[in-house]
Image (cartoon, rainbow, N blue to C red):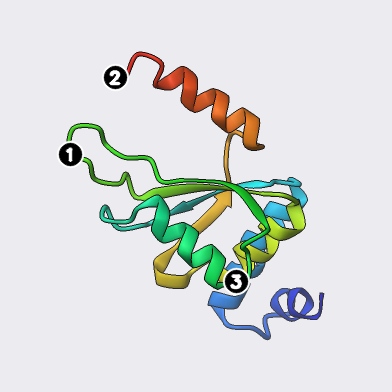
């Protein structure tokens, strides 16, 4: 894209270059699941869903989760969002990387089912 070319030539701000690099990483890996870091402990899944829906991503994702500490009930400072395509994940990353200090990167586990399976295994003994 033109912005990626500008970033490569040093004609964009450092913030824009970081956004381009984060979005390119998502697209290069064909990632659909991203991890959003640097959330406040008070952030809930519903807060991220509201952000997604109010920003034009209402039909673009099929999973959103903010892990919580079971003892304190506080968020762990991250969210996982699975998009229906790598392009949607890339656009979200481009739009929100750096917003409120958010750091967005491809998640280790990719896809809705892989994330559900991971969370089921991890919490199978939690009551």
Most extreme residue toward the right is 1
Q: Earlier in the sequence, mark 2 or mark 3?
A: 3
* 52 sits to left or right of 70: right
Q: Quadrant of the C terminus?
A: top left
Q: Do the residues labelled 2 and 1 touch (CB within 8 Å)?
A: no
Q: Which residue is rendered at x = 45% and y = 49% of the image?
A: 79
Q: In which quarter of the image is residue 15?
A: bottom right
Q: In which quarter of the image is residue 22?
A: bottom right
Quote the CA–CA distance across marks 2 and 3.
37 Å
Image location (x, y in percent) of residue 98: 48, 69
Image location (x, y in percent) of residue 38: 37, 57
Q: To which residue does mark 3 refer?
A: 95
Q: To which residue does mark 1 refer?
A: 72
Is label 1 or label 3 in front?
Answer: 1
Crowd rating for badge 1 (residues with CA inside 10 Å; few <14, some 14–19, many 20+)? few
Q: To which residue does mark 2 refer?
A: 127
Q: Do the residues labelled 1 and 3 touch (CB within 8 Å)?
A: no
Quote the CA–CA distance across marks 2 and 1.
15 Å
Q: What element carries label 2?
A: loop
* 54 sits to left or right of 38: right
Label annotation for residue 105:
none
Q: Nearer the viewer, residue 125 or 4?
A: 125
Q: Earlier in the sequence, mark 1 or mark 3?
A: 1
Q: Earlier in the sequence, mark 2 or mark 1?
A: 1
Q: Is mark 3 on a helix, strand or loop?
A: helix
């Amino acid at each position: 894209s033109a912005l990626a070319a500008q970033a490569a030539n040093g004609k964009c701000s450092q913030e824009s270059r970081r956004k381009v690099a984060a979005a390119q990483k998502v697209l290069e890996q064909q990632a659909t699941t991203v991890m959003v870091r640097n959330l406040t402990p008070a952030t809930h899944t519903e807060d991220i869903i509201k952000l997604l829906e109010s920003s034009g991503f209402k039909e673009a994702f099929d999973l959103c989760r903010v892990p919580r500490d079971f003892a304190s009930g506080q968020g762990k400072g991250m969210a996982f969002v699975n998009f229906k395509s790598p392009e949607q994940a890339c656009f979200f990353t481009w739009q929100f990387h750096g917003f409120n200090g958010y750091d967005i990167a491809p998640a280790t586990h990719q896809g809705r089912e892989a994330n559900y399976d991971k969370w089921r295994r991890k919490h199978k003994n939690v009551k």
